[in-house]
Image: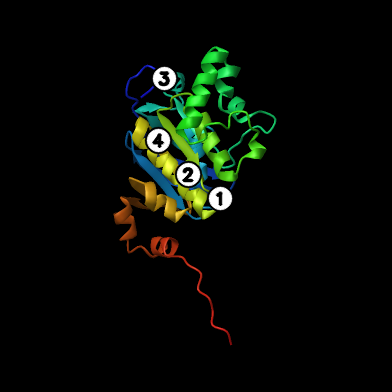
Amino acid sequence: MNDNGTTQHGVSVQVRGIRRSYGAQEVLKGIDLDVRPGEIFVIMGASGSGKSVLLRHIIGLEAPDEGEILINGESIHSVDVASKYRMALVFQSGALLNSLTVGDNVGLYLSEHRLKSPDEIRKIVLDKLEVVGLKGTEDKLPSELSGGMRKRAAIARALVIEPELILYDEPTSELDPVSSVVIGEEIYKLNKRIGVTSLVVSHDRDLAFGIADRIAVMHEGEIVALGSTDEVKRSHNPIIRKFIHADFKRQPKA
């Protein structure tokens, strides 16, 4: 439910023929995707596969050489779309300001743009911190939180705008296995609780198969698989099988 007591709905995302090169290096090679409203869609792939570059294009931080990104069928480069749909990005690092308290970080957008009164902002901040399991941390500094707690604070900050689309860039990077599970659970619970569309970029196989409604696997700037978790797991594509079944094989001692 949003602040008005109505059910929140996610948006659809359409990626059409996206190409992007940096000099002679073609990073995105004609990407096509359809993300359904309210689903958790994970873009998975090894480092350097182009998934984070694609994420930056979807949020509008970069413009493609060819192709277009649509939100509910409307181009993200339309001024109307920018004001019509609420989108939030949870950065890989969390991107919290160390000089501000957790509460001030979470409410920063509202206070900077003077969208609410100080009392209203504090109420919203406390509510969003409680949603992500961080009740009572509003007066702490980011340095006093664990890595997983900082990630959850970053998610709380994204929630203050009541987003219809949340994009997560490697949300479990630099986290221990237990904290990674907690973050995955938070993404899943939020998606089901408020109906937001969640687009997650990750190389974390456990996260992807644990929370995704559908997965796209990227390799060298292309989509090499797209489907449900079971469909991707059953793929016979050697690239996919190598990635999802990669494991350390200890050599016997001589």
Cα separation between marks 4 and 2: 11 Å
Taking the spot 32% from the left edge, 36% from the top edge, the residue there is 36
Q: Are marks 4 and 2 in contact (CB under 8 Å)?
A: no
Judging by the rendered image, the residue that carries numbered circle 2 is 183
Residue 152 drawn above or below residue 247: above
Taking the spot 53% from the left edge, 76% from the top edge, the residue there is 250
Q: Are marks 2 and 1 in contact (CB under 8 Å)?
A: yes
The quarter of the picture where the C terminus appears is bottom right
Q: Are marks 1 and 3 in contact (CB under 8 Å)?
A: no
Q: Is residue 234 visible?
A: yes
**What element does badge 2 sit on?**
helix
Q: Residue furthest bottom?
A: 254
Alpha-carbon neighbours of circle 2 within 10 Å: few (<14), some, or many (≥20)? many
Q: Are marks 4 and 3 in contact (CB under 8 Å)?
A: no
Cα separation between marks 2 and 1: 9 Å
Quadrant in which residue 153 is drawn: top right
Which numbered disc covers residue 190? 4
- What's the residue type where badge 4 is placed? Leu
- What's the residue type where badge 1 is placed? Leu
Judging by the rendered image, the residue that carries numbered circle 3 is 84
Where residue 110 appears, x then y in whole percent?
55, 19
- What's the residue type where badge 3 is placed? Lys
Where residue 1 appears, x then y in whole percent?
35, 24
Cα separation between marks 1 and 3: 35 Å
Name the N-terminal-most of marks 3 and 2: 3
Where residue 210 appears, x then y in whole percent?
38, 51
- Mark closer to the observer (1, 3): 1
Residue 68 drawn above or below residue 245: above
**What element does badge 3 sit on?**
helix
Taking the spot 53% from the left edge, 29% from the top edge, the residue there is 157
